[in-house]
Amino acid sequence: MAEVERISSVSEAPEPATQDELPPTGTQLTPTQQRLLHAGTWIKLMPPDRADFLHTVMCQVGLPRRRTDAKTFERHSGHVSVLLEAGKLYDGKDFVEQPLPYGTIPRLVMVHVSSEAIRTQQRSIEIGESMRQFLNMLGMQTSGGQRGGYTALRKQMEALAACRLTIGMHAEGRVVTVDAKPIKRFEAWLQHDGSQRTLWPGVLELSEDFFSTLAEHAVPLDYRALAALRHSSLGLDVYTWLAHRLCRVNNPNGIMLSWENLRDQFGQEYHTSKDFKKEFRQALRQVCVVYPDARIEEIIGGLKLYPSPPPLPPTTISMMLPSGNTPVDNSGDPKSYPR
C-alpha cells in the first residue's frame, strides 16, 4: 500500500510559511524542517517520558486558526458540532470584550491545562511557572514587549478564559446540547492602580462538566510532536484528530473520507477547495513525520485511513470527581461523547 505521497517519509517535510517543498539534497534545511526531522527521529527511537492530554471533542473540532472579528464560530465533525462564542473579562474596572481565541497558543494552552488537571486531580490550574516551563519546553517565546510571545500568550489566555463553548451531538439515538465551557474562572494579579499587572502567577479553573469528562475522554498526545508542530494550527488540528481517530478504525481495508468531508471539518477558513487541499496535504505530510505509525493513503476523491497504533499506548486515567461523585476512568467505552 502506498502511503500518502510517501507521506511518512522523514525526508519530505515542507516549510509551511513559504509552502515550498524541501530543498534539493545538499541545500540547508529551514529551522522548521530541522525541528520536524529531529522530532520524528526522536519519536521513532525513544518513547516519551510523559503523556500530555486533550479532550476528545477538541481533537475532533478545533478552535479558529486565524484572527477573526466574528463573535461566534462553528465547526462540525460527524455527529459532533461545536459553537464558540466570544465573552468578556473583568479587568478591575470594566468588563472588557474579548475576541475569539485563535491560532496555536490556545490549542497548546488547552493541552497544558487538561494535562495538569489529570496529573494533579484538580480543577484549578496554576498558570504561573508551570505554563512558562511548558511553553519553554515547546520552544515558544515567553519574552515581553508588544510583539513578544508573552503578550500574545496573555491575550490568547484571556480570550480563551472568556469564551463559551457549546457542544451539539447525536448520542445513543438522541440529539444533545451540552454547555461545556472549559474555563469557569480566571484570576490574574493586579497593579496598584487596579489594572492587570501580569498573567504570572494566575489560576484557571476548569468547569465541572469539562473536568468530569476528561478522564474517559482524554486523548494521549506526544509533547514532542506538539513542539514540532507549534508553528501550524492546522498541523496541530490534524495531529490531534489522527491521534484520536486512527486507533478507532476497525476495518482492515480502511475507511474513506472525501475531500468534501475533510473541508467541512478543517477547511472553513479556505475560500476554495484547491487552496484547502494544498494546505491540508502539506500539514498532513508534516504530521506524519512526527506520527510515523499513521497509516494513510491518498486516493481519488480523498483519503483512506487504516487501523494504526495511537501515538502513545492507551492510558488508564482515574480522576476523583467533586464530592458526592464516584471516580471515573477512561478504560471503559465512553457514553456521552461519540468517538
Image (tube, rainbow, N blue to C red):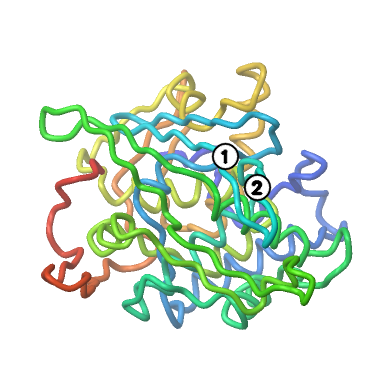
The numbered mark at residue 86 is 1
- Which of the two marks, 2 or 1, is nearer to us in this view? 1
| Secondary structure of the residue carrying numbered label 1 | loop
Q: Which mark is residue 210?
A: none
> Which one is in front, 121 or 87?
87
Residue name at image x 43 percent, y 79 percent: 50
**The one of 328 and 199 positioned closer to us in this rendering:** 199
Q: Foreground residue, 35 or 177?
A: 177
Q: Which residue is mark 2?
A: 103
Q: Position of residue 219 (x, y in %)?
A: 35, 59
> Label 1 near label 2: C-beta < 8 Å?
no
Residue at the image point whose x is 37% and y is 70% from the top: 123
> Residue at coordinates 58% horizontally, 53% vertically from top-left?
9
Task: Specify few, some or many for label 2: CA neighbours under 10 Å numbering under 14, 14-19, or 20 or more.
Answer: many
Return the x and y of residue 227 as percentages of the image width and height: 61, 65
- Amino acid of disc 2: Gly
Q: Residues within 10 Å of mark 1 (few under 14, many from 20)?
A: many
Q: Which quarter of the figure is the C terminus placed in?
A: top left
**Up/down of 124 relative to 75, above or below:** below
Amino acid found under the numbered disc labelled 1: Ala
